[in-house]
Image (cartoon, helix red, strand yellow):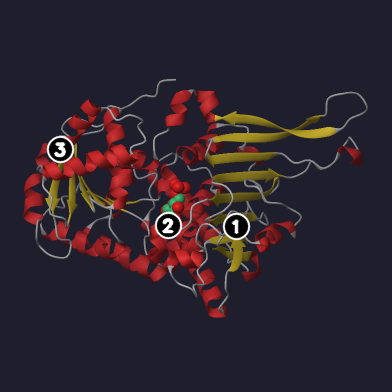
Amino acid sequence: MVSRVIPVDPFDLVIFGGTGDLARRKILPGLFRRFCAGQMPENARIIGAARQDLDDDGYRKMVGEAIEEFGKVGKVDKKALKAFQKQLHYVAVDAKGDGGWDALGKLLRDEEEEVVRAFYFSVGPSLFPDLAERIRSHGLAHAGVRIVVEKPFGHDLESARELNEELARHFNERQIYRIDHYLGKETVQNLMAVRFGNMLFEPLWNAQYVDHIQITVAETVGVGGRGPYYDKSGAMRDMVQNHLMQLLCLIAMEPPARFDPDAVRDEKLKVIRALDPVDPDSIVRGQYTSDGEANSYREDVENPLSKTESFIALKCYISNWRWANTPFYLRTGKRLNSRASEIAVVFKETPHSIFGIDSGRHRNVLSIRLQPNEGMTLGVTIKEPGPGGMRLIDVPLDMSFADALGPEAEEVTDAYERLIMDVIRGNQTLFMRGDEVEAAWSWTDPLIEGWERRGDSPKPYDAGSAGPDDAAFLINKDGRRWRGIKS
Ligand code: BG6
């Protein structure tokens, strides 16, 4: 299967924080892959901007090394890399002062040349207002300019609102691309394709037929070198408020009239607004302890008294006609026993079994695997082969996208490269709108305030396990069990 590559318009992409970790690991290797795929026009330019004193050659060398290290392209094609490097430039810019801005302005092509101009804020959110202000005051923000901002988008509702207001002083909503990289993942978009491209699922996709839905995003890694950030955030702010909420929205939303930015984002917003507050008894927070080899969470973040959660599981409800009384179980954590992200739609049992009680209780389950081994499995009930009566068993109808679509599916476009190309194309469908982000904080803030007020401590769990026992209890007490990772 050969995928079609449609080249984008010529662009000037300025990456603030162009020497930073995200730029080196994700953004630049992603752009190189798009270059190799023939999607980047020859006259596109990538301009690294950071405080470091570098020239074009120094930057090209640094980017070359980053691509060798993080490029995921197997053996790097030297000729292609050289050609890509020619499209790279560098300007030393001071985000909090005026240094470098004139030089940056000179490098950018005029509006009349019809070149897309985008500024990627790959820096901490505290610098967003400074950058927005300076782009405007140095006359670099014409009406077609786009800015790309990274998470975390605020720390709570108030700070997110302030950020939205700051950005709105200089740019309108159509110009602001808030990244949630989960929306750039192939299978996450497949959720929409599966739901709205097939007749099979949508009629059953509601409280009448669905027993419950589970969303698990399990990681084996710890917090690594991001302790100072993570310890102030925890799993709720780092993962649930954004990535898991986005997955929940795509699973639960009504069919948008069109696959266009506002139609999709309006529907997602309605889901967030229909979420009930969560009962404190329906939230389990955890923190990993050492497995004897690797550090404990507290050692990782160098805070021996930390009460921040590295794991969270919760049960929530969406109060609308489609989902009334259907539990949604969400779970995410670090240093768990496997890396697996999965959404499971667990259907109800048949209303009556014609086969009698000996045939057991069976439920269809649709599991959508986001990573690894992207694909879908539909559990169906069949007759156990052999004589001796009608015994029923569940078997998987399994579809791995790699098997079904061939080797190219294994090289799925990385979330970042897809999202950056969408910025250049001016397509905001896979980016969060300001009101969506604020609505998500409005839901998570009271939960966080609740446990802070009560002084709750997270439950310890062994690194390499499935999380605290209480997380299993949360679902088991409802007569259900977690799926997706080993328990
Ligand atoms: C990031 C979080 O947004 O997503 C990290 O800050 C997390 O803590 C990461 O590890 C997970 O992303 P992925 O694509 O590896 O599932």
Q: Position of residue 44 (x, y in %)?
A: 18, 35
Query: Type of residue at label 1?
Result: Ile
Crowd rating for badge 2 (residues with CA inside 10 Å; few <14, some 14–19, many 20+): few
Nearest the viewer among 144 and 311 is: 311
For marks 3 and 2 on the same chain, the one whose residue lies earlier in the sequence: 3
Label 3 within 8 A of ligand 1 by Cβ: no
From the image, state whether disc 3 or disc 2 is nearer to you.
2
- Whether residues under marks 2 and 1 lie with C-beta atoms below 8 angstroms apart, the answer is no
For marks 3 and 1 on the same chain, the one whose residue lies earlier in the sequence: 3
Q: Residue at x 62, y 36 (%)?
A: 201
Q: Residue 442 vs residue 474: left or right?
A: left
Q: Which residue, given by chain and number where applicable, does mark 1 sit on?
A: 318
Q: Secondary structure at mark 1?
A: loop
> Which disc is residue 224 wearing?
2
**Distance Cα–Cα, label 3 vs label 1:** 45 Å
Q: Residue at x 90, y 41 (%)?
A: 357
Q: Residue furthest front?
A: 293
Query: Type of residue at label 2?
Result: Gly
Q: Which residue, given by chain and number where applicable, does mark 3 sit on?
A: 114
- Whether residues under marks 3 and 1 lie with C-beta atoms below 8 angstroms apart, the answer is no
Q: Position of residue 169 (x, y in %)?
A: 23, 63
Q: Residue 36 vs residue 309: left or right?
A: left
Q: Residue furthest right?
A: 388
Query: Type of residue at label 3?
Result: Glu
**Rendered view: 183 above or below 401:** below
**Rendered view: 431 above or below 241:** above
Crowd rating for badge 1 (residues with CA inside 10 Å; few <14, some 14–19, many 20+): many
Q: Secondary structure at mark 3?
A: loop
Nearest the viewer among 101 and 270 is: 101
Q: Position of residue 308 (x, y in %)?
A: 50, 69
**Distance Cα–Cα, label 3 vs label 2:** 43 Å
